[in-house]
Image (cartoon, rainbow, N blue to C red):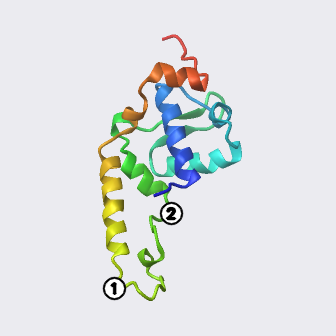
């Protein structure tokens, strides 16, 4: 199983926002921290906002924050929302044309593997990815504002 860069970047954005503890963050900050294209992150953030993971506020003083607590953002849900499809092989697709599909055991085995993969992700939330926060904050160059 391989996730797209889009999903990878989505998870990274959520980690960054989770570490910032409701401080407003710009796409540019996240782009710099991960050394990822700002334009690509704009598309990622747009999707995360549409699915209700991120709250975006425009204008002066605007920025991004998590739309809900990190403990309520399930990793399996994020992956399912961000991945265009989870068709591991052609026979998973309705338009698949593999001639041995009706007798092949590969589809059944891969379906079981995918189900196990998603079951593991279902057991974790964004909160689980924020540990160890001080180490991650240091690696990303995050300096939290004094309360």
Q: Label 1's element?
A: loop
Residue 84 circle label: 2
Q: Position of residue 13 (x, y in %)?
A: 54, 39
Which quadrant of the structure image shows residue 62? top right
Structural distance between the alpha carbons of marks 1 and 2: 27 Å
Total numbered badges shown on the rendered structure: 2
The answer to whether residue 103 of the structure is visible from this angle is: yes
Horizontally, residue 44 falls left or right of residue 114, namely right
Horizontally, residue 39 falls left or right of residue 8, namely right
Q: Is 67 located above or below residue 90 in the figure?
A: above
Q: In terms of sequence position, does the residue under pointer 1 or pointer 2 come before the other?
A: 2
For image coordinates 35% across by 48% down, the residue present is 121
For image coordinates 32% across by 72% down, the residue present is 108
Which quadrant of the structure image shows residue 81? bottom left
Residue 60 circle label: none
Residue 103 circle label: 1
Q: Label 2's element?
A: loop
Q: Is 47 located above or below residue 114 in the figure?
A: above
Q: Give the camera-side residue of 108 and 141.
A: 108
- Look at the image and tell me in which quarter the N terminus lies: bottom left
For image coordinates 44% across by 38% down, the residue present is 67
For image coordinates 44% across by 64% down, the residue present is 86
Q: Give the camera-side residue of 119 and 84.
A: 119
Q: Position of residue 49 (x, y in %)?
A: 51, 47
Q: Residue furthest top?
A: 146
How many C-alpha atoms fall within 10 Å of the one at disc 2: few (<14), some, or many (≥20)?
few
Mark in the foreground, 1 or 2: 1
Q: Where is residue 94 in the image (x, y as percent from the top left)?
A: 43, 81
């Amino acid at each position: 199983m391989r996730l797209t860069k889009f999903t990878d970047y989505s998870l990274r954005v959520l980690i960054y926002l989770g570490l910032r503890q409701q401080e407003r963050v710009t796409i540019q900050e996240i782009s710099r921290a991960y050394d990822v294209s700002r334009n690509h992150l704009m598309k990622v953030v747009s999707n995360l906002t549409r699915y209700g993971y991120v709250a975006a506020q425009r204008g002066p003083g605007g920025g991004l924050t998590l739309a809900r607590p990190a403990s309520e953002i399930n990793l399996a849900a994020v992956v399912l929302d961000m991945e265009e499809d989870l068709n591991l092989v052609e026979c998973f697709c309705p338009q698949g044309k593999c001639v041995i599909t009706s007798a092949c055991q590969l589809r059944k085995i891969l379906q079981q593997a995918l189900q196990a993969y998603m079951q593991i992700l279902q057991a974790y939330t964004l909160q689980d990815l924020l540990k160890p926060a001080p180490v991650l904050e240091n690696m990303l160059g995050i300096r939290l504002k004094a309360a």
